[in-house]
Amino acid sequence: MTAPVKMYTSAFCPYCTRAERLLDAKGVTNIEKIRVDLDPDQKVEMMQKTGRRTVPQIYVGSTHVGGFDDLYALDQAGKLDPLLNGA
């Protein structure tokens, strides 16, 4: 059982696609996607929560991971799997 993953995203976002591929490779089958390009209120909420303006913004459980580069760095450091497994 993996921790729930939420990703603020938009259409035509190559880093969003890369993040999805990495999470898919880790066995994450269900990502709650929030399209900030379709709902400006969600973008405002994302910026208030994360302090960032760019997508993707990724949460694993209640932990704000950040964008794709942050997700990739977490994986390279061996810390993504424990986070996904709820440790």
Image (cartoon, rainbow, N blue to C red):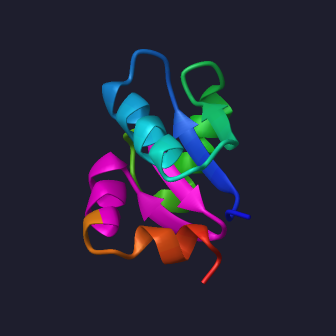
Quadrant of residue 87 within the rendered picture: bottom right
Q: Residue at x 53, y 74 (%)?
A: 83
| Left-right relation of 57 to 84 | left
Above or below, 29 against 85 in this view is: above
Above or below, 56 against 67 in this view is: above
The N terminus is located in which quarter? Answer: bottom right
Above or below, 54 against 1 in this view is: above
For the magenta stretch, what is the residue range?
56-75
| Left-right relation of 41 to 78 | right
Nearest the camera: 57 or 42? 57
State how many labels appear.
0
Q: Give x and y (percent) for residue 68.
A: 34, 47
Nearest the camera: 41 or 54? 54
Q: Residue at x 39, y 76 (%)?
A: 79
Q: Give the residue at the far bottom of this rendering.
A: 87
In the image, residue 69 lies in the stretch drawn in magenta:
yes
Q: Residue at x 40, y 15 (%)?
A: 12
Quadrant of residue 37 within the rendered picture: top right
Q: Residue at x 27, y 74 (%)?
A: 77
